[in-house]
Image: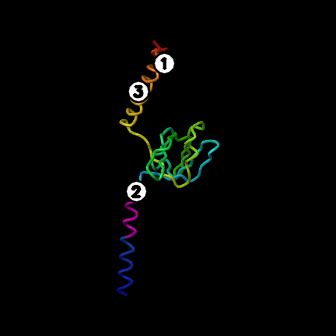
Amino acid sequence: MKKIKGFLIALTIILVVVTFFSGIALAAQVTRVNKFKGHVFINGGEDAGYILGATVCFVSSSGEELICGTVQRASASESMVKVERSDTRRRRITGGMEALLYGGEEQKEEIKDKEEIKEKEETEKNGKTKKKENWFQ
């Protein structure tokens, strides 16, 4: 009787710890890939924050960021991410890979900064300055 009681207590502790740590995981995993259409299905849904229009980046096992895409369809438990078809890095995405939700204002600012730097490099390369026109004034 003491052995059974000890086993049940250990089992209860394990279940409590597992349920506690399951809510902490922020990354989803790739469940299937349609490489020709550029669709990647992940097991994270709206409940995990993968809402329509959210940016998701796929990370290889070595920690290298492969490619990012946007959520096109989302249900409670699964989402479909569209990656650019012309990018050949999409072919390296396989089932079981990690999909990280890419968000936050700081990261958006970093992206804008990178785009501005890229624009400056292109304009210096071409020797022209781009005029930004505001059509609504």
Q: CA distance from mark 1 to mark 2?
A: 50 Å
The answer to which of marks 2 and 3 sits earlier in the sequence is: 2
- The x and y percentages for residue 28 are 48, 52
Q: Mark 3 — residue?
A: 117
* Whole-number angstrom distance, CA of label 2 to CA of label 3: 38 Å
Left or right of 79? Residue 115 is left
Is 115 one of the magenta-colored residues? no
Q: Position of residue 14 (x, y in %)?
A: 38, 70
Spot occupied by residue 7 in the image (x, y as percentages of width and height): 38, 79
Q: Magenta residues, as a range? A: 14-24
3 or 1: tag closer to the N-terminus: 3
Q: Where is residue 38, by image quadrant?
A: top right
Quarter of the image containing the N terminus?
bottom left
Figure check: 82 above or below 95: above
Which residue is painted at 37% across and 66% down in the image?
A: 16
Residue under pointer 2: 23
Between marks 1 and 2 in the image, the one whose residue lies nearer the viewer = 1
Q: Are marks 1 and 2 in contact (CB under 8 Å)?
A: no
Q: Which residue is depicted at the point 48% across and 48% down? A: 99
Eyeballing the image, is 66 above or below 122? below
Q: Earlier in the sequence, mark 1 or mark 2?
A: 2
Q: Is residue 85 left or right of residue 21?
A: right
- Which amino acid is tagged 1? Asn
Mark linked to residue 126:
1
Q: Secondary structure at mark 2?
A: loop
Q: In the displayed structure, does residue 34 sit left or right of residue 65? A: right
Q: Quadrant of the C terminus?
A: top left
Q: Nearer the viewer, residue 102 or 97?
A: 97
Going by the numbered disc 2, the residue's amino acid type is Gly
Query: Which mark's residue is nearer the viewer, 3 or 1?
Result: 1
